[in-house]
Amino acid sequence: MNQKALRTLEFNKIIDMLEAKAVSVPGKAMARELAPMSELYDIEIALKETSEAVGVALKNGALPLGGMREIAGAVRRAEMAGILMIEELMHVGEFLYVCRKVTSYAKEAFGGSAPARGERLASAFARITPLPSLEKELNRCILSDTELADDASPKLSDIRRGIKVQNARIKDALNSVIHSQTYKTMLQDPVITIRNGRYCVPVKAEHKGSFQGMVHDQSGSGSTLFIEPLGVVTLNNKIKELEAEERAEIERILRRLTGLVAQDAAQLGVSLEALTFLDFVFAKAELSLAMNAYEPAFNDRGYINLKRARHPMLDKESVVPTDIRLGGEFTTLLITGPNTGGKTVALKTLGLLTLMGHAGLHVPAAETPELALFDDVFADIGDEQSIEQSLSTFSGHMSNIVKILAAVTPFSLVLLDELGAGTDPTEGAALAVAIIKFLHDRKIRSAITTHYSELKVFGLQTEGVENAACEFDVESLRPTYRLLIGIPGKSNAFAISRRLGLTEDIIESARAFLSSEDERFEDVITNLEISRKSVELEQERAERFRIEAEKLKSDYESQKAKLAEQREKILREAREDAKKAVDAAKREADKIVKEMRDIKAASGNIKDMEEKRGELRQALHEFDAAEENTPPPAYKKPDRPLVVGDRVYIHSLSQPGIVLQEVDSAGSVLVQAGRMKVKVGLNALSLDETPVSGPQANKSARNYSTKGVAERKKNISPTLDLRGDTADIALEKVDSYLSDAYFAGLETITIVHGKGTGALRFAVQAFLKTHPHIKSFRNGNFGEGDLGVTIATLR
C-alpha cells in the first residue's frame, strides 16, 4: 500500500489507537509495524487471530500482561557471558511471573485443549514455558532494582552483618567523643557527619592541633574542619574492607544468576516472542471491542458492502452510521451534495475501513461486513496546495491524480475528493468526466465526490456508474450525514440562501440565469427526493405496523404459554392428588395381600416340612448305619434355660441345630438348622448333650443338615423368569420363589425381568429391599444379562 494513501486516510491514527491498547514495549513495537497486506491468505489468518482473541477476552477478560518487561537485550548479553545488572535480573523475574500468570489464564480459557475457534492462540500459549525454579531464585535474591537481599548468599549475609556491627561501634565511639567534656569546647556542634565516606565530627579550626585525627573536609568559611577521630580510623578502615568484600560477593552472585538466565536463554526467547505476539493480537481484540467492530468477510470479486459503517475517529455514540456499497452492479460511485454534508467522511470511511480490514483489524460496521481484496488503495483527498512547490489547489490535486492514474491497476481502489475542482467549472467538469471514464472503462473500483451537474448526468447515463447523495435537511440547514445510493445530490444553494434571508427577487434573478435544462434536471432531482421521502415515510409506517404486529404476536404467544402453564399446573396437581389416593389404596391392598401371603406361606411351609420329615429320618437311619461306632445322641427335654450355643434336636424337622438367641416372651428360640434359621417352641426341642469331639462330629452335623437340603436343591432352579408378567403377579411369584430358594439353601439367585421401560425391574428391586431373606442384590453385569436381570444374594 502506498504511504500517501495511508497518511491521507489517517491510518496512522488507527495504529496509534492500537499501540495504546498493547501493554508491553515489544507489543507496542509490533503494533507500530502493522501495515495493510495484499495476500488474502495472510489477511484471513490475521482476522481469525483477532476474532479468536475477541472471543477469549469476552469470556475470560483481558490478557494478564501487567509487569511484562523487555528482556531481549539482557538475555542476549547473558548468552555472551556478560554480567547482568540487578535491575535486568529483576526484569527477568517479573517476565517469568507474567509467563506463569498467562499460562494459568490459558488453562482457564482452553481447559487444556484448543477449542475449535482458538487453534492459533492456543499454539502461541503453548510456546510459553514458566520457569518456576529460576523465578523463585531471582525473587529470593533480589530485593529491589538496586539491592540484593541479605540472604542471597550466606557470605553476603555475614558481610552485611559485620558492616552493621562496625557501624554501631563507630557510632558508639563518636558518641563518646561528642559527649566528652574534654572535646566539648573543641566541637562546632555535637553531631556526627559523613565526609568522603568516612564518619567525622565538626571541629573548630582553632582547635585543629589539639584534636587528634584525620581532616577530610572544611566548611566554606574555613571555620569548621571535619575530622575523623584517630580512634575511629581503624573502625572506618574495617568498614571499607567489608564494603569491598560486599561488592565482590555481589558480583559473584550476579554472575551466578546471570548463568542461570543463560541456561534458559533459548526458552526465554521463545516465551518472549509468544507473549509479544499475544500482546499484539489481544491489542487488536481490545481495539475491536472498543469500536464495537466485527470481522469482515473478504472476497476477490471487488465487492464492498458496509452496513451502518462508522468512521473510527468519530465518537461512536454520536456519529451517524452510513451504508456504502461498491463493486456489485456498479464499479464507480459518484457522491454529490453540499459542502459539509458528509461526502468526504463517507469517502474516508470507505478507504480507512478497507485499509483496516487489509491489516487484519475488525471494522466498525454492522455484523458480517464485506470487503474486497485490493492490491493498493489510492486517495486524493484534502487541500493539495503547496506554496513551496508553486502549486495551486487544482495543480496539487492534478499532480497527485496523474501519479495515481499511472500506478493504478484493475485490482485497485481509487478515492477522489472534489474531482475537477479549483479551475474553470466547464473544463474541470470535462476533465472529471474523462478521468471517471478512464477508471470506469478499466473496471477499477472508484468512489468520487463532486459538485458538477455534468457528472450527475454522466452517472445517470452510464451503465456501471451509480449516483449517490449525502442527505441535507433544508429546514434545519444541517446535513444528516446519510449516504443515499441511487439518487444524485442537490447543491440546495437557492434553498439555503432563502433560509439565510436572501431576498426573493435576487433568488429569482439568479434562477433566470439557469438554463431550462439545468432547471429541469434540478426539478427531476427534487421530484426524486420527494418520492424518496414518501417511500421512506411509507417504509417507516410499514415498519411500525410490523413492530406492532410482532408485539401483538409476542403478547399472544406469551398469554398462550401462560394459559398452557396454568392448565398443566392444574392437571399436575390433580394427578398428584389421584396418585396419592391410589398409593394409599395400594398400600392398604399390599398390606392385606402380604398378610394373606404370610398365612399361606406358613401353612405351606409346615406341610412341606412334614413331607420332608420322613426324608430326614431316612437320612438319619442311613447315617447311623454308616457310623456304627458313633454312639446315638442322647436327647432329652431341656431341664434348664437354653443359652446361645446349646445344641438341640428339632423334632418337627428331625434335624439337629444350634441355639442362636435365648428364649423370647412367646416361649420360642431362634435355631440354626443347617442353612436355615427357624424359630421353634421349647416343646418341639430336645437338648443334645452328646459329647462332641473331632471333625467326625462336625461331619455328622453337616450330614444331618444337608441331606434334605441337597434333595430339595434338585427341584429349585437358581433362575426365576418374570418376563411377560404384570408387577403384581411378578411380585407374588418372587415372594413364593424366595421362600423355596431360602429353604433349599440357595446362596445366589437370578431374577429375569427384561429391560423394557424398567418398571418391572424397579418393582422387583423395591420388593427385594425389604424382604427378610435377601442379603443384597445388584443389576446384572455384561454377559449376565445387563439391566434385564437382577442378581440377589440370600441370607
Image: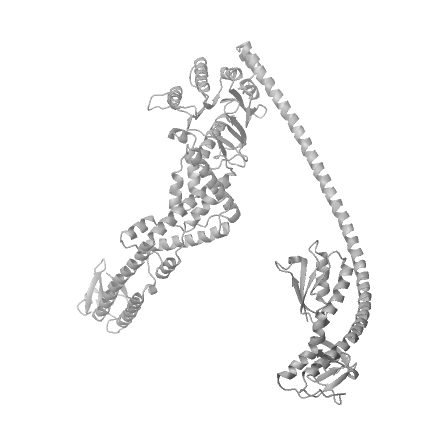
Relative height, residue 281 to residue 435 (above, below): below
Residue at 55 percent of width and 10 percent of height: 517
Residue at 38 percent of width and 29 percent of height: 2
Q: Is 688 positioned to the left or the right of 220 in the image?
A: right
Task: Name which quarter of the figure residue 145 lies in.
Answer: bottom left
Q: Quadrant of the C terminus?
A: bottom right
Count all numbered tags in the image, as a single digit.
Answer: 0
Relative height, residue 355 to residue 673 (above, below): above
Q: Quadrant of the N terminus?
A: top left
The one nearer the camera, 589 or 175, is 589
Relative height, residue 707 to residue 286 (above, below): below
Residue at 47 percent of width and 40 percent of height: 48
Please indicate, yes or no, whether residue 584 appears anywhere in the rendered image: yes
Please indicate, yes or no, whether residue 202 appears anywhere in the rendered image: no
Colour scheme:
one colour
x, y percentage for residue 593?
A: 81, 65
x, y percentage for residue 705?
A: 70, 77
x, y percentage for residue 640?
A: 74, 89
Residue at 82 percent of width and 68 percent of height: 596
Q: Is 311 positioned to the left or the right of 29 in the image?
A: right
x, y percentage for residue 721?
A: 72, 60
Relative height, residue 95 to residue 453 (above, below): below
The one nearer the camera, 568 or 519, is 568
Task: Name which quarter of the figure residue 27 lies in.
Answer: top left
Q: Residue furthest bottom?
A: 639
